[in-house]
Image (tube, grey):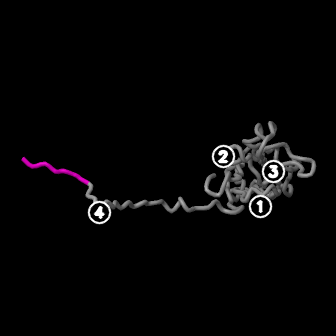
Amino acid sequence: MSSKVNRLSMVAGVAAFVLMLAPSAFAKPPRSGGTASLPCGDGMITYSPTTLWPPNHKMKTIAISFAESETTTDSDTLGLQVTDIENNQQTEDDAGGNGCGKPTAKQGPDVVFDSTLITGPAGDDTVPVTTTVQVRAERCAKVQSARIYTINVVCSDEGGTDSVPLPVTVAHSRGRR
């Protein structure tokens, strides 16, 4: 009867190790960028950028548009409205402290948007409806995760209204989202 024995040989007290890292280990979060499209009613909401970097406390503009996704002869009037902007670190901001805090008078608000309903030309659903919002490229340093702004929008056409949340991420650090 024979048995196999596995053993580690050491030559002159030296062992070799191979460390293999996935390419993603070297990936850096992109600078501000990215585009996303989400269905809303009978059309599509498209917005950009979806990622903000670096977190330098500067206001960044997010462009949002709503367009019919198919060509129809019903000649709807399109509408787009930003109803609210929230973020997942608001509790920490309200509490203040090191690395987090309420916006100062000098800094201004973290979000700027107009909640007025924007409509396209009456009876013409071939022209996209667009608007912009601004969010501050920052995150709470003491929270070990990304800040995610959620831009809540409502799209409308003659068929009704629908609402969609649009996430925009500010990475916590270059190596972590």
Q: Please report whichever mark, 4 or 3, sits nearer to the chain's N-terminal start.
A: 4
Name the residue that disc number 4 marks. 12
Q: Disc 2 or disc 1, which is closer to the eye?
A: 2
Residue shown at the point (69%, 43%) measured from the top left: 143
- The dot on residue 64 is none
Estimate the spatial distance between the alpha carbons at disc 4 and disc 3, rounded to whole Å.
73 Å
Q: Earlier in the sequence, mark 2 or mark 3?
A: 3
Front-most of residues 171 and 169 = 171
**Residue to which mark 2 is pinned:** 145
Q: Nearer the viewer, mark 3 or mark 1?
A: 3
Q: Which residues are magenta?
A: 1-7
- Residue 66 locus on image (x, y percent): 76, 55
- Give the foreground label among 4 and 1: 4
Tag 1 or tag 4, which sits nearer the N-term?
A: 4
Cα separation between marks 4 and 2: 46 Å
Tell me the amino acid under the disc marked 3.
Leu
Q: Which residue is mark 3?
A: 80
In the displayed structure image, the side of residue 6 where residue 123 appears, left or right:
right
Q: Secondary structure at mark 4?
A: loop
Q: Nearer the viewer, residue 155 or 21?
A: 21
From the image, state whether disc 2 or disc 3 is nearer to you: 2
